[in-house]
């Protein structure tokens, strides 16, 4: 039994090594724009290739305003879709995500000096569901954007922090996206008010 377990473990390590060499990268998240899903300092697995990302995928792409900088966000708009807000609610080509507000928390982002009060919600759009931080007092406002062909509109799960997604740098060409993030490998040990329980080697929504 022990010999079989060691054999299987060896095979798993070989398979992981091949995947790591040819198909995957380990990336460290640099800011809290994807909180509560990802926090600054988290180590994640990136599956290489992002030009065929689906709605809801978390992708890493080149900043369209600075080719030397990478950005991260969730795909909430694809070719010819229109992304906007209506009465403070996100609207994607006439469809609003459903929001299930779980609680209100004070989140201490590394990008700000003080905690910010946010609403933790579970959002569903189409066939994908994810957690998000929404402003507690001020409605969400997006400039209406029609996504060009072969582009993505990226929105961070932290809706209170707009400097790291398409609200600031616009849509991104799909062919500049280097991969999709699919697993949280090692969460940062500092939750800073994040109410989600996040574990090692956790598949991401």
Image: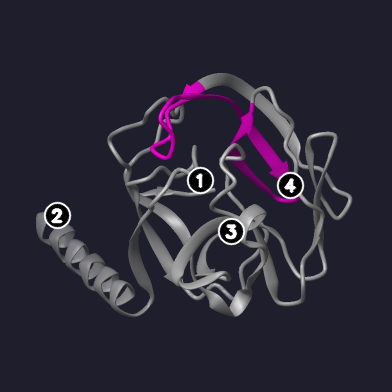
Q: Dots 2 and 1: beta carbons under 8 Å?
A: no
**Point 53% across, 62% down: residue:** 59
The magenta-colored residue range is 106-135
| Residue under the image location 38 percent in, 52 percent down | 30
Mark 1 nearby-residue class (10 Å; few <14, some 14–19, many ≥20): many
Label 4 to label 3, Cα distance in Å?
A: 12 Å
| Numbered tag placed on residue 125 in the rendering | 4
Q: Is residue 133 magenta?
A: yes
Of badges 3 and 2, the one in the foreground is: 3
Q: Secondary structure at mark 3?
A: loop
Q: Which residue is mark 2?
A: 1
Camera-near label (4 vs 1) is 1
- Mark 2 or 1, closer to the camera: 1
Q: Which residue is nearer to you in this view: 119 or 202?
A: 119
Instruction: Categorize mark 4 by other alpha carbons within 10 Å: few (<14), some (14-19), many (20+).
Output: some
Instruction: Count residues near mark 3 (Cα–Cα under 10 Å), then give few for <14, some for 14-19, many for 20+.
Output: many
């Amino acid at each position: 039994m022990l010999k079989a377990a060691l054999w299987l473990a060896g095979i798993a390590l070989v398979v992981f090594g091949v995947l790591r060499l040819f198909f995957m990268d380990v990336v460290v998240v640099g800011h809290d724009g994807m909180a509560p899903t990802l926090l600054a300092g988290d180590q994640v697995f990136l599956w290489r290739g992002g030009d065929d990302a689906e709605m809801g995928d978390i992708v890493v792409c080149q900043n369209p305003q600075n080719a030397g900088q990478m950005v991260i966000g969730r795909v909430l708009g694809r070719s010819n879709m229109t992304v906007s807000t209506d009465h403070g609610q996100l609207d994607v080509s006439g469809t609003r995500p459903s929001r299930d507000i779980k609680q209100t928390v004070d989140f201490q982002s590394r990008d700000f000096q003080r905690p910010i009060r946010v609403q933790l919600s579970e959002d569903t759009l189409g066939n994908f569901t994810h957690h998000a931080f929404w402003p507690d007092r001020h409605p969400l406002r997006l400039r209406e954007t029609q996504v060009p062909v072969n582009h993505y509109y990226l929105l961070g799960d932290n809706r209170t922090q707009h400097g790291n997604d398409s609200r600031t740098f616009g849509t991104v060409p799909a062919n500049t996206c280097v991969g999709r993030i699919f697993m949280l490998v090692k969460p940062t040990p500092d939750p800073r008010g994040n109410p989600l329980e996040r574990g090692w080697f956790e598949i991401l929504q």
